[in-house]
Image (cartoon, grey):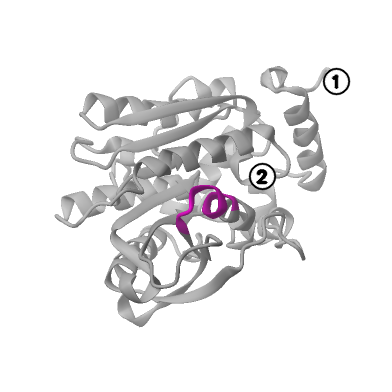
Amino acid sequence: MNDQTPECWNLLDDNAAAMARIFGQIIPKTLRELGPEQARAAANTDAPPEPMIPLDKVDQLTISTRDGGAILARRYRPDGTPSGDFAPAVVYLHGGGFVLGTLNGADELCRAIAAGSGWTVVSLEYRLAPENPYPAALHDCVDAFAWLIRNASELGIDPDRIAIAGDSAGGNLAAALCLHRRDAGLTLPRTQILAYPAVDDTFTTPAWTEFADAPLLSAADAQWLWEQYVGPNHPGGDQLAAPLRAATLRDLPPALIITAEVDPLRDDSEAYAARLWRDGVRVTLTRYSGVFHGFLSEVALFPQANHAIDEICLYLSEFARK
């Protein structure tokens, strides 16, 4: 590191600091300078020719959404799943600031969760902003979750054991889906797993200043991504856009919330965990030290990612019982 390295980088462990420098070389400009198309070209990754975690049963689904639309999804079934057995399933929503992210970018993470937990994982390719601003992505997730419940038997899934999970923007969408289903009087996910979720639209907690120059996701880029999602005229305060703004979080599913130490979203995510606890929802909060935003999906790069996946799999085991 040199004298121009942001002070907050000193909190990174040696591996994360090295990864931060590499990411800085791969994406030398800020996301807001690149704009959506160039940012996607620079940041989105293809699946490797040979996955690190091979599974015998990975296939693609086409899920119907409102107004005759459809989105793609990828289903990961753990090896050894008995034929005809109705397995628990977790719907996974990838991160990417509502603008970036693909099924391929979450592929190894979903494989790891399926292999480690014994749960079927269904990863969704929801529509992205700014071409499809709020609430398009949320509508896709809401519709896909309802579709999975309706078609659970055909898919070999137990409709009473479907969880929701996501990281970053996907964590936002997972939390918002739970709020939507609660307020609509619908069956809730068995549990919610949120990794550094984007849950507030005020950008006022200390982490936004302390980690303004964090690697991979700066405070300015995070706010730019948010603007792409909600559009220039969104009034703010909408609980389905910013779940921390909900009047109450009572009666939501139990939650596991994972945060990264060096992340402008850290305090908002941890405030959401505190709100859940105060509102009577059982919550487990784990902060992973020495890493920055986005570490969870980088399965091969961060030891903390593997520890977090182990935590997720152990957590899911509690909800696997019928």
- Residue carrying label 1: 2
- Residue carrying label 2: 299
Q: Nearer the viewer, residue 313 or 197?
A: 313
The amino acid sitting under disc 1 is: Asn
In this rendering, is residue 57 above or below 258? below
Image location (x, y in percent) of residue 199: 39, 39
Disc 1/disc 2 C-alpha distance (Å):
28 Å
Instruction: Place residue 108 in its image quadrant.
Output: bottom right
Does residue 3 show up magenta in the picture? no
Q: Residues within 10 Å of mark 2 (few under 14, many from 20)?
A: many
Whether residue 196 appears in this view of the structure is: no
Which-is-in-front pick, marks 1 and 2? 2
Secondary structure, mark 1, is: loop
The amino acid sitting under disc 2 is: Val
Q: Residue placed at 35% from the left, 77% from the top?
A: 154
Q: Is residue 318 left or right of residue 170?
A: left
> CB atoms at circles 1 and 2 under 8 Å apart?
no
Image location (x, y in percent) of residue 125: 50, 65
Q: What is the number of the mark on residue 60? A: none
Q: Residue placed at 67% from the left, 18% from the top?
A: 11
Q: Is residue 105 left or right of residue 83?
A: right
Range drawn in magenta: 112-120
Whether residue 124 appears in this view of the structure is: yes
Q: Residues within 10 Å of mark 1 (few under 14, many from 20)?
A: few
